[in-house]
Amino acid sequence: MDDKLMLMIPGPTPVPEQVLSAMAKHPIGHRSGDFGKIVAEVTQNLKWLHQTQNDVLILAASGTGAMEAGIINFLSPGDRVLVGTNGKFGERWAEVTDAYGLQTERLSVDWGKPLDPEAFRQRLESDTDKQIKAVIVTHSETSTGVINDLKTISSYVKAHGALMMADTVTSLGATSVPVDEWSLDVVASGSQKGYMIPPGLGFVAVSAKAWEAYKTAKLPRYYLDLGKYRKSSAKDTTPFTPAINLFYAMQAALRMMKAEGLENIFARHERLRQAARAAVKALNMPLYAADECGSPAITAVMPNGVDAEQIRSVMRKRFDIALAGGQDHLKGKIFRIGHLGFVSDRDLLTAIAALEATLQELGYDSFTPGAGIAAAAKVISNS
Ligand SMILES: *Cc1c(COP(=O)(O)O)cnc(C)c1O
């Protein structure tokens, strides 16, 4: 059916009507006082969302652009960087550090498992002459649906003195990321995930410690020179032409988030996480990530005896629900349910009901019809 598409993928995520209509206006001049007011408001609200007093800078870029900016502004060629890799995004940041001629040291675990904080502690403690200048961790590893223990890893990084750089693209706005309390130096995210805005904006939060490193950092930078964004931000403006209509969207979305409140936003995502996991278990399908490390934004499922791509195809064709597939070697092996951003209890119940119907259509009979919905409804009604 036309116009019925429901996005249950981890980005782009659904966009609320209020946000869509806020965007449907002429762009105004970005050097005008009116635009300055929008910059001031959204910057304040971004700090609220990041739970920080640090600068939060806004780029016309996707999440990768924000992350690349976060890496290149604070390092010099040849610097050693420790990168946690347990999925597609962790590996991407190692590719970025390789591309810029940094000495990349990967701390890897298998996909589907969380990074081991102890391995970070040991490696950092053994680095007595402080060769390691930065540690990069993906908080919520979207490719596998695993949440990493950023808080603990960051405490070891702080003790060592290196910069803590975090990809919080699918954790910010889904679970608490207290940037100041956890001493995160560089924190990157993108608009099409927890923010409930279309793709096109990237965000980077930068600590005072990172700005110290900026002064001597020698990697080349121009459009992504965060110093320019910081200077402009102090004057409620941007160094280059911003994505003006996305600023309208962001203004509306952040107002909605403030009205809901941080605690309620996090509780809703936790409920969706638990409901999705309970439903999948009731369907007798293995979860790709263990309960202790399941992401609040995304649930990865490894269907037994049914092709994951077939499930996605029926969900899309019969029910207009888009699920995400597996990436790289996980293609065809897993599917991923996104429950991030503008997603309600009703959306999840709908997706589970459609999933049950899909599985029946595909001849998968290892579950009692209705069991998935009952399990999800139980979580939702008890919380
Ligand atoms: C989506 C995502 C990104 C950013 O990807 P872009 O396509 O560049 O926006 C980065 N990290 C994680 C964990 C993501 O889920």
Image: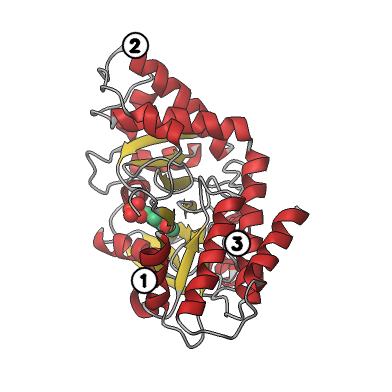
Q: Which mark is residue 33?
A: 2
Q: Is residue 279 left or right of residue 143?
A: right
Residue type for callout 1 = Ser
Q: Which residue is label 3 attached to?
A: 149
Based on the displayed image, in which of its 4 quarters is residue 318 positioned?
A: bottom left
> Is the C-beta separation of discs 1 and 3 under 8 Å?
no
Q: Earlier in the sequence, mark 1 or mark 3?
A: 3
Alpha carbon of mark 1 to alpha carbon of mark 3: how far?
A: 34 Å
Q: Residues within 10 Å of mark 1 (few under 14, many from 20)?
A: some
Helix, strand or loop status at disc 1: helix
Where is residue 253? Give x, y as percent.
47, 33
Q: Is residue 5 above or below residue 238?
A: below
Q: Which residue is label 1 attached to?
A: 313
Alpha carbon of mark 3 to alpha carbon of mark 2: how far?
A: 42 Å
Q: Nearer the viewer, residue 247 or 214?
A: 247
Residue type for callout 2 = Gly
Quadrant of the rendered image holding ligand 1: bottom left
Based on the displayed image, in which of its 4 quarters is residue 159 positioned?
A: bottom right
Marks 1 and 3: which is nearer the front? 1
Helix, strand or loop status at disc 2: helix
Q: Is residue 133 visible?
A: no
Where is residue 301? Give x, y as percent.
52, 74
Q: Is residue 144 visible?
A: yes
